Image (cartoon, rainbow, N blue to C red):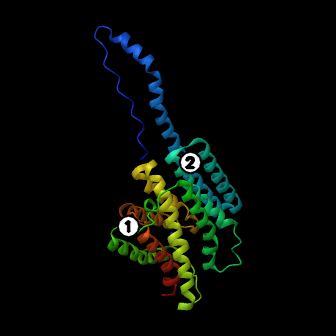
Amino acid sequence: MSGAPHPASMGAIPSVARGTGVACLDAQRVLSGSQFSAAEAPRTSNFKLLGSLVLFILGVAAAEMMTTYLHPQAGMGLHGAILVGVMLYSALRLRGAAQKFLYTLALAPLIRLVNLSMPLAQFQLSYRYMVTGIPLLISAILAWRLTGFRRESMGLCMGRGWPVQILVALCGLGFGWLEYHILRPQPLAQSFSLDQLWMPALILLVFTGFLEELIFRGLMQTAAEPVLKRMGVVYISLLFAVLHTGYRSAVDVVFVFLVGLFFGLVVQRTRSLAGVTLAHGLTNITLFLIVPFV
């Protein structure tokens, strides 16, 4: 496997003296014209940012559909254009929390660009996750340094509610079983034996469990919260689901959205990636290494 920030409120107009109400009110409007403009500026800026976020996720969805169903090279080109556009827009037009959010969102098209451009045919299926994961891990670390987020704010800590974290981790077994019956994928190992399973399981745990949770719940969701407030977790879960279009299953996209939403809410509550990292890893281990042999 966001409401927008409230615009700056406009100050109330001072009371007008009796007998000269109309004249004083007109003068007040003229003298405070700059205040109206200043108050409207954040409102306009917020609408533009929200519009940009809608266009971004629609663009990523279109690129994923193009890559999966039409022409991979064309989809790759659209992902590249989105990546360049996001970086330019965030560098030239945005500042503060909005800029950091757009920087982290740039990792979404980068994920697909790395997957499509790497020479993966020479590697075994399980090792492909590691080959694509290493450059993405480096990119995530660079994005982390660029945003300046504290380790604790990204969930890279013990957090709280360890009994809950363990229960969340165990949910991965059920999620993997359910997703297997949606996708019916081929196993990533030749046989159900320890020597065949331990390395693919470790790769899935690190490069899908930890890495994807670091990117989506650690970086993106942390950056989304100041900008999109409570809807940040929904927006990131939707983006997470869209990037699973390649499995050619609408049911799986919905399933991944719901799982991503669950993971996001857990991270919001516990302030830790520990439980969801294990759950995500166990989901894919169950999906690709256990249930196919059962």
Mark 1 neighbour density, 10 Å: few (under 14) some (14–19) many (20 or more): some
Task: Say whether residue 24 is left or right of residue 177.
Answer: left
How far from the left and from the top, in percent, is residue 86? 61, 50
Residue 109, percent from left and from top: 61, 58
Residue 23 visible from this viewpoint? yes
- From the viewer's perspective, tell me whether residue 226 is left or right of residue 70: left
Task: Identify the mark at residue 69; answer none if there is no mark.
Answer: none
Q: CA distance from mark 1 to mark 2?
A: 35 Å
Type of amino acid at the residue the image marks with label 1: Gly
Residue located at (55% from left, 56% from top): 104
**Of 153 and 191, the residue lying toward us:** 153
Mark count: 2
Question: Is the residue 52 above or below the residue 223 in the image?
Answer: above
**Circle 2 sits in a helix, a strand or a loop, which is it?**
helix
Q: Amino acid at mark 2?
A: Leu
Task: Return the residue at label 2.
Answer: 55
Q: Secondary structure at mark 1?
A: loop
Give the number of the mark in front: 1 or 2: 1
Say the numbered circle drawn on residue 159: 1
From this viewpoint, is residue 2 visible?
no
In the current view of this chain or complex, which residue is farthest to the left? Answer: 18
Residue drawn where x is 53% and y is 48% of the image:
53
Q: Locate residue 173, reporting x and y percent.
A: 42, 78
197 is higher (above) or lower (below) than 149: below
Q: Nearer the viewer, residue 15 or 49?
A: 15
Residue occupying image coordinates x 37% and y 75%: 166
Which residue: 35% across, 74% down?
167
Residue closer to the observer: 294 or 28 = 28
Q: How many residues crowd around disc 2 within 10 Å: few (fewer than 14), some, or many (20 or more)?
A: few
Q: Residue furthest top?
A: 19
Q: Position of residue 90 (x, y in %)?
A: 58, 47
